[in-house]
Amino acid sequence: MDAYGLLLLILFIALVVGLTPLVGGYMARLFEGQPLLLSRLLGPVERGLYRLAGVDPGREQHWSAYAGAFLIFHLAGVLLLYGLQRLQGFLPLNPADMAAVPSDLAFNTAVSFVTNTNWQNYGGESSMSYLVQMVGFTVQNFLSSAAGIAAAAAVIRGFARRESGTVGNFYVDLVRITLYLLLPICFVGALLLVWLGVPQNFDAYTEATTLEGVRQIIAQGPVASQMMIKHLGTNGGGFFNANAAHPFENPSALVNLIHMVCIFLLGAGLTNTFGRMVKDQRQGWALLAAMGLLFIAGAFISIWAEAQGNPALTQLGLQNMGNMEGKEARFGIVASALFAAITTATSCGAVIAMHDSFTPLGGLIPLINMSLGEVVIGGVGSGLYGMIVFVLIALFIAGLMVGRTPEYLGKKIEAREMKLAVIAILATPIAVLGAGAVAMILPIAQASIAAPGPHGLSEVLYAFLSAGNNNGSAFGGLSGNTPFFNTAMALSMLIGRFAFVIPVLAIAGAMAAKKSAPPSAGTFPTHGMLFIGILVGVVLVVGGLTYFPVLALGPIVEHLALSSGTLF
Amino acid sequence: MTVHRPKSRALFDSAILVQAAKESVLKLDPRLLARNPVMFTTAVVAVLSTLLSVRDAVEGTAFSGVMVQVSAWLWITVLFANFAEAVAEGRGKAQAASLRRSKTEAKAHKIDSIEATKATAIPASQLKAGDLVACAADDVIPGDGDVVAGIAMVDESAITGESAPVIRESGGDRSAVTGGTRVVSDRIVVRITANPGETFLDRMIALVEGAKRQKTPNEIALNILLVGMTLIFLIVVATLPAFASWSGAVIPVVFLTALFVTLIPTTIGGLLSAIGIAGMDRLVKFNVIAKSGRSVEAAGDIDVLLLDKTGTITWGARQASEFLPAPGVGERELAQAAFLASLADETPEGKSIVALAANHFGFKAPKGADIGIIPFTAQTRMSGVDLEGSQIRKGAWDAIQAYVAERAGSTLGGAPRELVSLVEKVAKSGGTPLVVARDGRHLGVVHLKDIVKPGIRERFATLRAMGIRTVMITGDNPLTAAAIAAEAGVDDFLAEATPEKKLELIRQYQSGGRLVAMCGDGSNDAPALAQADVGVAMNTGTQAAREAGNMVDLESDPTKLIEIVMIGKQMLISRGALTTFSIANDVAKYFAIIPALFLTAYPQLQALNIMHLASPQSAILSAIIFNALIIVALIPLALKGVAYRPVGAEALLRRNLLVYGLGGLAMPFAGIKLVDLAVNFLGLV
């Protein structure tokens, strides 16, 4: 890694770490229902929304009611988004006269946006009206993020409370998070982006004649408003098909840095919120440190591998400038590799380069980041509660070795919690390996795979890892817009989101009901280096043991073959 | 104060091993296997793989020799796990058999009422709760019960191993008797309190035999995790052929089954129940009966330990600790007077004065001297001697004061001020001042105090290192209690304790989320014993206390709670360590099997064969053989338990992670390589 790469990485980490306690503290006050700076301004809106929806903000929910509300809300979102796409031809704000989206694609896209995956089997500028983009996608970008953060808030309360029957009110959390957290940041952020050159308009596409005399259609639209939430909410669904590689989405190095920091901002901040609410900020920093170690290791390897370039080119006697294939020249190798690590460590999925064209090792890192279950910062909310499931498993195994019933923050981890944690960690392998295996053997699915051999396997594995972990980034190469992939990936996204979050909310309920034992010399402290090490180890071992065989058949064998001069 | 040592027995006894080998085959019964999900899965896979290899052998497919061997090793894996459990049970049974001997032949003399003299003889096994039985000298007490009439010496050596007979009498705190013990003298009437099959002896036998063993909460939780891991690996292995088919690789099913079985946590799955049984067995060796495994496990979680002062922390009787002479009197003179005054005193206090004086100054009892013994009376509240015309008296401060005043013929208050302050000093330190006077003259004060048992301070320090807070319970006033608490090194104390205050204290700790252990013997301890998370009743205590507690210490030693806590912790640590080891092992197994599975499709994967195993067949066979052998190799560890050291949690964890985590990661690389060398040397592939 050269000095520029190191500097960019350090600057990025410093910004994230510096902002974490600020954002974390703000969210802690938000979750605890305390008055905030904007309360005076937005308070009437908040109360009006409760009255409109018939929600009693003072009434908290049992975890099961919370989970029920979470499910119903998502179901409504899917139906609404599906309807919008199918009917866009009859609806306003459709200057480009887009026709109805086919049913399988509409289903995939609806599930994708509602589950905070934002996998895109469509090209935005060629198939979706402005109305769908704004009322559908942008709204879901907010709501799916807010729902994820709400679930995390419930989980945090589970650990912060003692002998409590409730974990909060889903609707209140949803409203407060959207109103006081996401909207204000996005409002200010979007203005900043507009100032930095990101378009925000409702104009029809501009027709231009290039210097070569070729007619070109320049797509545009309300881009800036979608950019902020796309990254802040780890959504990743681009306005344009080229996603953040598009100059209108990502016009400069500064905007690129803002995008990257936004992707980590809330996920990192939530660790601090967790620490604050359990009355020990060190607990939050320990989680962030574990996530950080995994992230930095991945980023280093990815940047290094891309800088090495393709040995086959070197053998041909060509000057090896590193692997520039599939990268935007404006960003170059370091920023592209770093962005790839960031977007897959979190479940964002925005891309500024084609991961398909990375070197095998460079492409392995995004795969590994996702196979670890999106807990390296992860999706907003889901990253934190995903990591907490790993904490419970790590503490259960390691905690037994100190000779006590394992406990986290004074709460005992018993059979019920273990059962729920196991259900949760089973969800993603089923969603990824189960669906992926079907895709590998069904002829209708095989037709979509562009590359033969291990690289083709990587394409499919990447797609399902992305769907099952609600990431949404694409490897490329795979023609995903087929009835099979649209349906299979939608199912994979649904399992990955709900089969994980429901047991996790149940854990929150179980934990909230427990007493909390004060720590003693016999309890294992969960804020030290040893804990961080164990947590990192367990995340790697669980992810590694689950995906090693498949990765061996994909990128690992590809890498080994590349070293010996074979390409796929 | 001694650290308890269990009755020793060789880890392996050949009779037990032979029996266990038979048992391990009998335990292939699917109904028994179903209790252990991991092993049940392994057995199912073994059946499947056997059928397939028979088919392949008949058809003469390639590698069929290896497949037959893999199937055989799958069966051996199950057998080894059964063997581990059977050995643990066998050791328990050996223990139970000796207990049972005392149980079989007892005859009961059933009577209709306490006054009745006519008894009907019935077998002890037919007694029910509420029956009255008469036990005369040399009778074996036929069942657990309470003495309702009479007093007798009882030999409890069959249960406790303690040879000196103990007194059992009706009423009070020494009324409980245990079935199987023998009356040595006199006659008692016992009301039976346990139905057949529910006596302590029965419970003890059931626990060590393991037959009716219920899984403890942590064991259940761990089992869930193991099932979860098994399911994950099932998904991994079941989807692998589909992914491999994209590259045209075909994986023989038997190889897949080998991969699956080596990945699932067979090591801990095979040893889990052995660890539990062995833990109970260890407890019984310490002469403690637990009513359930759950309470033993809870003992490992204890945060607070309540201990009675008397008999646990101190010896019980007050002892002389120093001589504090009055002004103008030598220490030797005071000691000599106290020595002489106590020569005839048979109380523990008196004896301790004699011993202290003799130790310090080498006094000997005067022979042939004219000694008039003045015994203690309730009126004078003094005792002493008249020796060669001189009067020596010792007693409480006010009694001696009155005596001196009377002798001097003056009014009260003639005592020197320094003496008064000595008396106050002793009282303030929690001791009892005993004043000595000779011929109407104050000589000084003997400091009597509760002597803290030697070594107890260190044991409390150990507990503190384990994260356990010790609380001393005493009926003393707060001043005395504070002094003794400081000396013994307990973390806290409850003075002027009443049963209500004890109960209140336990509840208070529990509401703060702490787990509390206590031991007690009297009837008034029963509510507190029942409220405590771990209540250890003394076997000498009342039946009410024994029923209320969830453990009974047959040796009635309250400090044994420390050992119980250690055993509880050891059980948990052993499970955690072997789970970690089991999971860590999987890494090496991947490196052995993955390159072997895909070698034909992707020769490049040979780079992952970092152990340089000779061939794909030998790699797979070696992994499965290692996987089976490691179970047997770890049986001694499962039975003995992983060593527990009372250091902080972090240090303990670091050490165990190093040994079982990193060890578990590295060891199979060497192990599989060695097996591979052996497999190739023997030409098995």
Image (cartoon, coloured by chain):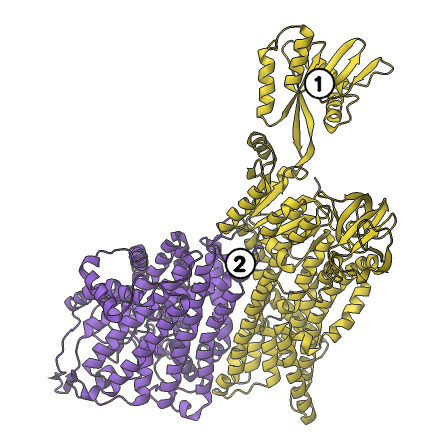
Quarter of the view holding residue B144: bottom right
Q: What residue is rendered at 40% in x and 51% in y?
A: A280
The residue that mark 2 highlights is: A406
User: Viewer-proximal residue, B587 or B343?
Assistant: B343
| B178 relative to B603 in the view: left or right | right
Type of the residue with mark 1: Thr
- Disc 1 on helix, strand or loop? loop
The answer to whether tags 2 and 1 share a subunit is no
**According to the colouring, which chain is yellow?**
B
> Which label number is shown at residue B380?
1
Q: What residue is rendered at 52% in x and 87% in y?
A: B249
Report in which chain the residue with disc 1 lies: B
User: Viewer-proximal residue, A253 or A131?
Assistant: A131
> Which label number is shown at residue B75?
none
Query: Exactly how many numbered labels are in the figure?
Result: 2
**According to the colouring, which chain is purple?**
A
- Disc 2 on helix, strand or loop? loop
Asked whether residue A311 is in view, the answer is: no
Image coords of residue A199 (percent x, y): 16, 73
User: With respect to residue B627, does A394 lie above or below?
Assistant: above
Quarter of the view holding residue A378: bottom left
Image coords of residue A365 (percent x, y): 40, 71
The crowding category of the residue bearing disc 2, from other C-alpha atoms within 10 Å (few below 14, some 14 to 19, many at least 20), is many
